[in-house]
Image: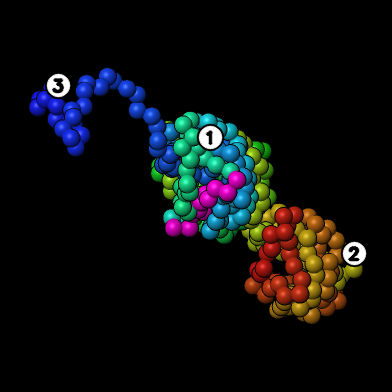
Amino acid sequence: AAGIASSLDDAAGNAVGNLSAASLSDASAPVLSSVRYEDNDTNGTIDRARLVFTESATITYVDGDWTATANSLTSFDVSAISSGNISETIYLTASATSNLTGVGAGTQPTLSFTPTTGSIVDASSNAVSSISATSLTDGAAPARVSPSYKDVVSVDGMIDRVDVVFSEPVVVATCESSDYTIGGADSTGLSVASCTASSSTLQLVFSDAPARDTNLTLTLAYTAASGVANSLRDDSSNAVPNLSATAISDAAAPRFRTDTGYRPKYQDANGDGQIDRALVQFTEPVTITYSDADWTATANTLTSFDVSGISSANGTAAVYLSATAAANLTGVSAGTQPTIAFSASGGSILDGSSNSLTSF
């Protein structure tokens, strides 16, 4: 007896004798310590929920026992055991809307458990009585949804930015041009000059793109380990993985050309001494849906000059409009030439990706 002898006794003063070492049995049920949603196959859609318990647990899954509340993670739900049963970390099969891998604090989905015919037990059959609604944290990396190139910085017919849309808001911890590889037939000389994030869109400002060309063939790849590793991530520090080269789609509207050699021209195609067509040129092939009210022709000294429809070459970068003017007049002095303007109302000027030129 250590210390005061016989200090443990019953009400009649009978002392408890020495007790040999004995194992304590487990009478405590597992406790859920963390839960998060994940995109295991990195395709931009949540596909599992990770549950971590304070000890190895076994789930007998019955769907009615589980309540998933999606909140901002649209259509979030769980449906079965995915893997890891009989361990501390168990994955449930999950689903949610596509191209959404993260939501803001306070809008996360929740998950609760109330056993009816299913159960969560440990190896000693201690059962979890219930799990109250618990917010799932973001364990999914942002997935690339779509990259597109644009002419939005200077709006001059030169591609100057690529916008990469991700499945959730992204953070550019460090902007490194070496992280991004630009490929494709029109990539010569192109480089990333700056990179910023605007919610779910990564904006890469380009330099040295071909002038007056809004129809490029480009690809974009991302290397996570280049320079400062994992410099592109979400608000929960889930890093964007390597992204293989993928084609960048055209989101740049065609531009009307007025540079030397490409200014609009009036012509006498049949050589009869009377203007009969006008040539208008663009930074890429376009299709004009002609509506006369969209077009304003000002004759100046080319008397009675006007346009009235498509003549030929629609669907190319150089389209001919049918034109008229006074007979026996095929040229006027500099500064007195006719002008032409366009403002879409009933018709349109579209490129092959349906990007619209609204006016010039």
> From where the camera sits, is residue 220 visible?
no
Three-letter residue code for mark 2? Asn
Q: Which marked residue is nearer to the observer: mark 1 or mark 3? A: 3
Q: Which residue does the numbered mark 2 point to in the structure image?
A: 270
Mark linked to residue 58:
1
Badge 3 or badge 2: first in the primary sequence = 3
The residue range painted magenta reads 106-117
**Amino acid type, callout 3:** Ala
Task: Say above or below: 230 vs 105.
Answer: above
Rendered residue at 78%/60% (across/down)? 287
Where does the C terminus fall, quadrant-wise? Answer: bottom right
Q: Residues within 10 Å of mark 1 (few under 14, many from 20)?
A: many
Residue furthest out toward the top: 20
157 above or below 344? above
Q: Nearer the viewer, residue 205 or 134?
A: 134
SS class of the residue under badge 3? loop
Provide residue 47's location: percent of width, then percent of height.
Answer: 60, 43
Residue at (47% x, 46% y) in the render: 129
Within-10-Å neighbours for mark 2: few <14, some 14–19, many 20+: few
Separation of disc 2 and disc 1 at Cα? 87 Å
Which residue is more in the foreground, 262 or 4? 4
Looking at the picture, the colour scheme in use is rainbow
Task: Give the Cα separation between the discs numbered 3 and 2.
Answer: 124 Å
To which quarter of the image does residue 338 belong? bottom right
**Residue type highlighted by circle 1:** Thr
- Along the polypeptide, which appears first: circle 2 or circle 1? 1
Q: Which residue is mark 3?
A: 1
Q: How many marks?
A: 3
